[in-house]
Image (spheres, rainbow, N blue to C red):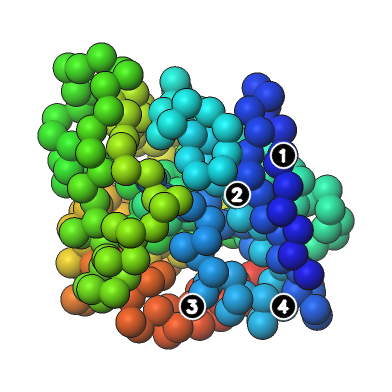
């Protein structure tokens, strides 16, 4: 069963949210998407999770796709983990006594990492995919950019997204993928990443850190640095040889989904 609705975030911004209920539910997974994309790009992952008994909550980050907010714009990096907290709280409220896992990709990985840092112990465990946690690859050049926050740049991320040309083509033709990215959004990563580094010891949740070695958008060194710095006792790092940024959309994606599900299954509350 699927349900789509608008959920009011901490400051009144309405976030487009989708809930898919597993027939034989054993736990819950919340998915946070990346920069300029939308929740529909995680359909294959959601379907696989559902089959394995995970009810799935997805939402669109503010200023993205069907959510409210100035297009691809953040005033402050805290809006990301705080919006996510709204969705995590909803998932917990609607599924009392169930483990709630968190999966974040790319900018959604930054969102999930900052959520875990700011609100430790709120997720049963966290999975990060190609997460921007350090900015080792200066894809937008040195930050902050010396341009007005309301300047918009063309979205040229498609090239580094995936080794599968069909995925790249679909990304570029997808009407819900944002075609412009604000300098305001890009610039919040400067204080955001600095804060993640400073507060690394506060991240103590169980975490599975995944990254493609050939990631053209976010350096795999981000994940290695984050992994080394955090306070978590239960942490696993996996760098995939020859995979690009969207490991969850690469041709070998089902193998990766299986690894994620097995890892989450091992951390289910009895």
Q: Position of residue 230 (x, y in %)?
A: 41, 47
**134 lies left or right of 269:** left
Distance from disc 3 to disc 4, alpha carbons, whole Å, reads 13 Å
Quarter of the image that includes the N terminus: bottom right
Residue occupying the point 20% across, 59% down: 160
Q: Which residue is mark 3?
A: 257
Count neighbours of disc 1 (C-alpha within 10 A) and say few if under 14, some if 14 to 19, many if 20 or more: some
Going from N to C along the chain, the mark reached first, 1 or 4, is 1
Q: Secondary structure at mark 1?
A: strand
Q: Which residue is mark 2?
A: 59
Q: Position of residue 57 (x, y in %)?
A: 66, 57
Q: Secondary structure at mark 3?
A: helix
Going from N to C along the chain, the mark reached first, 1 or 3, is 1
**249 lies left or right of 67:** left
Going from N to C along the chain, the mark reached first, 2 or 3, is 2
Quadrant hosting residue 227: bottom left
Q: Which residue is mark 4?
A: 53
Q: Please state which of the two labelled residues, at mark 1 or mark 4, is closer to the viewer.
A: 1
Count neighbours of disc 4 (C-alpha within 10 A) and say few if under 14, some if 14 to 19, many if 20 or more: some
């Amino acid at each position: 069963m699927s349900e789509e609705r608008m959920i009011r975030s901490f400051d009144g911004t309405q976030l487009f949210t989708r809930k898919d209920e597993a027939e034989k539910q054993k736990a819950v997974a919340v998915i946070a998407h990346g920069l300029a994309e939308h929740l529909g790009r995680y359909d294959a992952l959601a379907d696989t999770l559902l089959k394995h008994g995970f009810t799935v909550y997805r939402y669109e980050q503010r200023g993205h796709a069907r959510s409210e907010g100035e297009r691809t714009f953040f005033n402050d990096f805290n809006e990301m983990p705080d919006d996510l907290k709204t969705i995590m709280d909803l998932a917990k409220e609607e599924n009392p006594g169930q483990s709630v896992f968190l999966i974040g990709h790319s900018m959604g990985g930054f969102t999930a990492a900052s959520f875990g840092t700011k609100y430790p112990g709120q997720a049963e465990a966290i999975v990060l995919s190609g997460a921007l946690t350090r900015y080792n690859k200066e894809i937008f050049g040195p930050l902050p950019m010396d341009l007005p926050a309301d300047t918009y740049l063309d979205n040229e991320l498609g090239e580094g997204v995936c080794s599968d040309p069909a995925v790249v083509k679909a990304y570029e033709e997808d009407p819900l993928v944002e075609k412009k990215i604000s300098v305001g959004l890009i610039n919040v990563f400067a204080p955001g990443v600095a804060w993640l580094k400073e507060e690394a010891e506060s991240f103590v949740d169980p975490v599975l850190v995944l990254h493609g070695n050939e990631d053209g958008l976010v350096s795999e060194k981000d994940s290695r640095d984050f992994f080394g710095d955090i306070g978590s006792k239960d942490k696993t790092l996996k760098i995939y040889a020859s995979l690009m940024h969207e490991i969850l959309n690469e041709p070998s994606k089902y193998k990766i989904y299986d690894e994620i599900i097995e890892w989450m299954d091992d951390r289910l509350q009895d």
